[in-house]
Amino acid sequence: NKQKYFITTGSKQFDMLLGGGIETMSVTEVHGEFRTGKTQLCHTLCVTAQLPRSQGGGAGKVAMVDTEGSFRPQRVSEIAKTRYDLDPKEVLDNIIVARAHSHDAQMDMVTQLGVLFADPERGPFRLLIIDSITALFRTDFSGRGELSERQQRLNVHLQRLVKHAEEFNIAVLVVNQVMADPGANAMFGPVLKPVGGHVISHACHTRILMKKGRGDNRICKVIDSPCMPEAECTIQLTAGGISD
Ligand code: ADP
């Protein structure tokens, strides 16, 4: 059961950059500005994680912790139906979505999910999405002098995700925001960096930056991978999700 899987992103080029797709037993971070396609990537993976291995899938179920209310069942249905010719109801039945309104709830949910992942009657689960990993931590620890406590708690949270990924052979995908880097030279406009600093970079094996391109094109850049060089590709956002 401890064989690694790669779950297809829906784009061949993007999969190639990632060494095959989003990897199980590993935590992948995706960050980028608003409307760059981070949630569309999640919606696509909610479907592809369920595809058979022969189609680049994970042949498993999906769990999602949604902190932003960004999960759209309608989008998942559309992708399942138009792109993969699957029964949307069956696909949605295999996705467990939990809505968190505080960082405490978010952390508790991930702990609870461990019980679910360990239950052979309920699984197997192959994908866990946290969208967004940092937003509630930023809200709940927004006061002066709270940064180090925030980072400590975030670290505990991420270490639990790493453990789940390895223990249950799950691909963990965490969505992250970007913020203006106050330390950067802003001569050409604000320089954006992902939230969470070294706590995130330490826990995430692979990091993806998504940027806007022309129209519905998006640029995906793999910026931190243990086995792949830094490289980028262009993908499209379509009714069928992420594609070449
Ligand atoms: P983020 O999560 O990074 O803020 P999203 O994943 O929500 O961004 O991406 C929003 C973009 O997705 C929109 O700008 C639009 O171009 C594209 N999009 C949303 N729905 C569809 C659809 N049904 N067909 C094609 N593109 C879509």
Image (cartoon, rainbow, N blue to C red):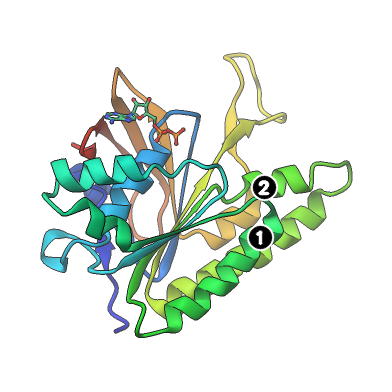
Q: Identify residue type, mark 2.
A: Leu
212 left or right of 244 in image: right
> Label 1, on which residue?
105
Q: Quick check: 78 left or right of 174? A: left
Amino acid type at image mark 1:
Ala
Tell me the residue at 59%/72% (across/down).
111
Q: Nearer the viewer, residue 97 or 142?
A: 97
Callout 1: SS: helix
Tell me the CA gap for discs 1 and 2: 10 Å
Residue 136, label in figure? 2
Residue 22 location, quadrant: bottom left
Q: Disc 1, disc 2: CB below 8 Å?
A: yes
Quick one: quadrant of the N terminus?
A: bottom left
**Mark found first going from the N terminus, 1 or 2:** 1
Instruction: Please state which of the two labelled residues, at mark 1 or mark 2, is closer to the viewer.
Output: 1
Q: Which quadrant does ligand 1 occupy?
A: top left
Q: Indicate the position of residue 223 as horizontal and vertical percent values.
A: 43, 45
